[in-house]
Image (cartoon, helix red, strand yellow):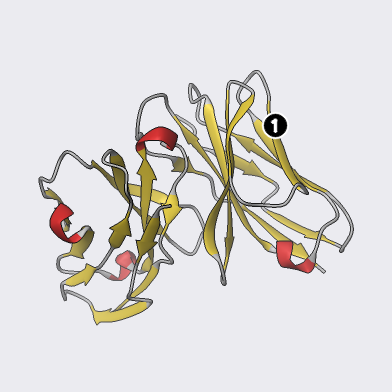
Amino acid sequence: AQKVTQAQTEISVVEKEDVTLDCVYETRDTTYYLFWYKQPPSGELVFLIRRNSFDEQNEISGRYSWNFQKSTSSFNFTITASQVVDSAVYFCALSVGGSNYKLTFGKGTLLTVNP
Amino acid sequence: KAGVTQTPRYLIKTRGQQVTLSCSPISGHRSVSWYQQTPGQGLQFLFEYFSETQRNKGNFPGRFSGRQFSNSRSEMNVSTLELGDSALYLCASSPLGRGTEAFFGQGTRLTVV
């Protein structure tokens, strides 16, 4: 069975601070995919990034960056110079090779960025 | 390109009733998945349809069912509603391919009273 753990339930920062959201996953499959989604108050889950298990390259997209480490089964997400608009719930999710359309989500981290 | 559309956005039902939720995927996407989101259990997978066939099913009772039409639109039905069915129901569509990302709608907020 798959499992995703987001140990941080809530994080509060002041605008312009950097913040890292942690994600630890468990799976016995060798082929898997990791995702991050953002859920603003409107409810829609917004896709941010996808990584497959064979690509450990870190990725940067503007103020967002992701650190994937298979050795520690972690896929952490960093927001640099946070802004109020970054306030949302962030979910880490996992799907495995045989059922790629079934996502296993973590419980989410509520990020509040204060002005 | 239009996103995933879910209707209705809000719904209030009484215990024992049944409800049908609708989802129109992104044009060209043939896979549609449904998720239930509650404060206690978080986001849980309900089922996934592809080409009118259910391919994956989560651990939910038989009161939860779904279907997909030839135009890829999907509906989910919950019969004999219970208070615990109150949740945000999210639909997602995906293009073909392994590990492709799912695109979510804004959800239907169901309240059972």
Q: Is A69 on the left or on the right of B20, as rendered?
A: left
In the rendered structure, which amino acid carries the disc numbered 1? Arg
Mark 1 lies on residue: B67
Q: Choose between B61 and A46: the one closer to the eye.
A: B61
How many callouts does the rendering have?
1
Q: Does residue A115 sit above or below B108 in this rendering?
A: below
Q: Nearer the viewer, residue B113 or A7?
A: A7
Q: What SS does tag 1 mark? A: strand
Residue A115 seen: no
Residue placed furthest toward the front: A28
Crowd tier of the residue under label 1, counting other residues whose Cα lies within 10 Å: few below 14, some 14–19, many 20 or above: some
Residue at 22 percent of width and 60 percent of height: A74
Residue B12: percent from left, percent from top: 79, 61
Q: Residue furthest left?
A: A57
| Residue name at image x 78 percent, y 49 percent | B63
Name the outermost residue toward the top.
B70
Above or below residue B17? Residue B77 is: above
The residue drawn where x is 70% and y is 31% is B67
Give me the chain letter of mark 1.
Answer: B
The quadrant in which residue B77 appears is: top right
Image spot of residue A36 (x, y percent)? 32, 53
Where residue A50 sits in the image (x, y, percent)?
A: 28, 43
User: Taking the image as drawn, is residue B31 in sight?
Assistant: yes
**A16 up-or-down from A58: above or below:** below
Is residue A9 rendered to the left or right of residue A55?
right
Report which quarter residue A57 is drawn in: top left
Does B50 appear above or below A22? above
Image quadrant in which the C terminus of chain A is located: bottom left
Q: Nearer the viewer, residue A26 or A90?
A: A26
Residue in view at x 50 percent, y 30 percent: B26
**x and y percentages locating residue B5 in the rendered image:** 58, 39
